[in-house]
Structures are given as C-alpha cells and as structure tokens.
Amino acid sequence: MAVDTEHADYVAPEDRAPGALRGAGARSPLFWKLILVAMAIMWGFSFYVMKDALDLVPPSMLLTCRFLSSAFIMLALFFRRIRRHLTARYLAIGLVMGVLMWAAYSMQTLGLVETTAGKNAFLTGTYCILVPFISYVLAREPLTRFNVGAAIICLAGIALVALDSVSVNIGDILTLGGALFFAFQIAVASKFGRDMDVNVLTFWMFLAVGVLSACASAATEPSPATVPWSLSLVGVLAFLAVFCTCVGLLMQNLALAHVPSSIGSLLLSLESPSGVFFSVVLAGEMLSGRLIAGFALIFISIVFSETHGAFLLHIAERLEGAAHKK
C-alpha cells in the first residue's frame, strides 16, 4: 500500500529508527563522527574569520544575520517537510532548542566582555563534561566511567590550550552558564533527533535564535545603519550564515541523532583547539610546548572514548612482553 507522504506524519529515511543506520547507503556512526570533527574544525576557523567582523557588527546583530538567513535557507529547502510537520510537538521542541542555543551564545558573548578569550574558550569547552550527565537524566543514555574519564582528560587538554589564568570573575560565571546551555542543547538534539525530522527541528531552532537575537539587538545595540557595510563584510556574514550556521548546525544535529551525545560533545570540543591552531597558522601566534601537550591530551581523550582504554591495555601487554624477553 502506498504511503501518502504529502499529508501523513512522514519522517524522512535519514531520520527514522532510533539507533539504526540511516541515510543514503546506511552511513555508519563513523561517518557522523567525522562530520562532527569537520564541523568543529570549521567553527575553529570561524573564530579567525569572525574576529574582524565583530569589530564592525554588534554581537546580537551578527547572530540575527546568521540565524535568520539560515532559517530562510532552511525554509526554502525544506518547505514541504516543515509544512508536513507543522505540529505542536515539533514547534515546541524546535523552539526549546532555539532558546537554549540563543541563551548559550548570549551568555558566552557577555562572558567574553568580562574575561579573556582563552578562559572563555576553556570554560565553554566544559560542556563536554556536562553532556553525559544531562543525557543520562533526560534520556537514560548510559553513563560509563570511560565517558567521564575521557571528558576529564579532554578538559585538561583544553585548559592547557586555552587557559591563561585561574582567577574567577563574573565573566567566567556567565561563560559557564553558556556552557550549561550548550550542553542542554546538545542533549536535547541527541534525544529528540533520533525519531523526529532533524531538518524541521533545526529550522525552528534557527528561527527562534534569529528572532530572539533581533529583539536583543533592537533593545541594546545601535541601528544597522551605523554599521560600515562593505562587500568583504557581507561575504564574511554570508560564510558564517551558510556554512558555519546553516550547514554546520544542521550537520551537527543530524550527527547527534546517530552517535551518543557523550561522544558527540567530546568531538565538538575540538572547536577550541582548532581555533588556536588556525590562530597559529594564519595569525602567526606562537606554538608552545603547553599547546602541543594540550592537543595531545585532547587526542588521547577521543581515542580513550572510542576504544574504552583498549589501547592502554595493548600498550601494557606489549611492555609486559618486552620485560619478559629481557
């Protein structure tokens, strides 16, 4: 019997069957993990791209440009699916994701005003520790010692890469609040993206962030007419809107529906070290031994999470074998 995909509560193949391999060619979890790594690297690059743009465009106005443009792109691409899923459940969950994302970005930006860029990046990266616990509460996703251990190792690596002092101020507290909202957004996307149309949820998320940012900008920032618009600035905003926001966050939400949120958050935390990497390569910042040690710890944390420490057991067995030979 044919399915009426025009009017039925239809979910696209790539968004069906929680835990199953979905999408063209039934892509494996490894594919989605690589997508998360690619998105984290792209967002790391966006820090370098955004640096000059934020000197010209106020933060909320920048978020408005990014997310409203992305919402319009999603509406054009997925209009039939958005109309098909115009239900209270989709609207509620998508808007909740949007409010969480907007709160995360807003608190992160406000925190950056009162603290250093390094501490802001480090404290934002603490969401990789928070996500496994939030996912356990929301979705009873298994919480293992390997998840927690890998997150702690990763956090230590981010600290070596980004942390430049240990004092605490209001900016640090705001940044931690932003990390908490990022963690909730990742956990919610992972939980509900497994049996709902991720494209539709992402559209409502973009729209919510864009509208809330526009309201904040209108209330607290100068008029857009005061911005020195230029072709290069428009190009930067288009890159941020299309690639870093529309493509990046859509791919993130799709990937989080296919991998455990604890592993997903760990891979997304590569954003911080990749931002430092591009600063070294493109802006001429010095690569110190502390940065190299931090990158090594982050890499070890990902390997530890993926192998559950099997590589350590293998190393121990090799060392024991070598000792017996002697």
Image: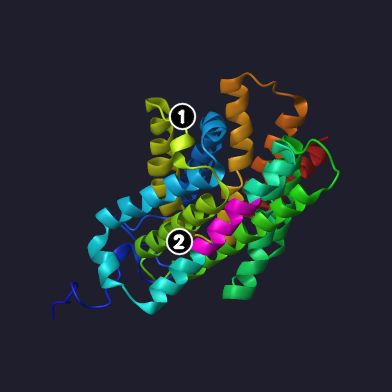
Position of residue 212 in the picture relative to residue 179 (left or right): left
What colour-coding does the image apply? Answer: rainbow
Magenta segment's dominant SS is helix
| Residue 205 image point, x, y percent | 44, 61
* Residue displayed at 83% across by 48% down: 168
| Residue 164 image point, x, y percent | 79, 35
| Number of numbered labels in the structure image | 2
Residue 190, placed above or below residue 176: below
Q: Residues within 10 Å of mark 1 (few under 14, many from 20)?
A: few
Q: Residue furthest left?
A: 1
| Residue 269 image point, x, y percent | 61, 47
Q: Amino acid at mark 2?
A: Ala
Decide if residue 207 is in sight here: yes
Pick whichever, 253 or 309, lies toward us: 253
- Residue 100 is inside the magenta segment: yes
> From which residue to which does the magenta span run?
98-107
Decide if residue 311 is in sight here: no
- Residue 16 is inside the magenta segment: no
| Sequence-first tag of 1 and 2 | 2
Quarter the C terminus occupies: top right
* Residue displayed at 71% across by 59% down: 148
- SS at mark 2 in the image: helix
Residue to which mark 2 is pinned: 208
- SS at mark 1 in the image: loop
User: Disc 1 to disc 2, how far (Cα)?
Assistant: 27 Å
Q: Amino acid at mark 1?
A: Pro
Q: Residue furthest top?
A: 284
**Closer mark to the observer between disc 1 and disc 2:** 1
Q: Which mark is residue 74?
A: none
Position of residue 127 in the picture relative to residue 58 (left or right): right
Residue to which mark 1 is pinned: 228
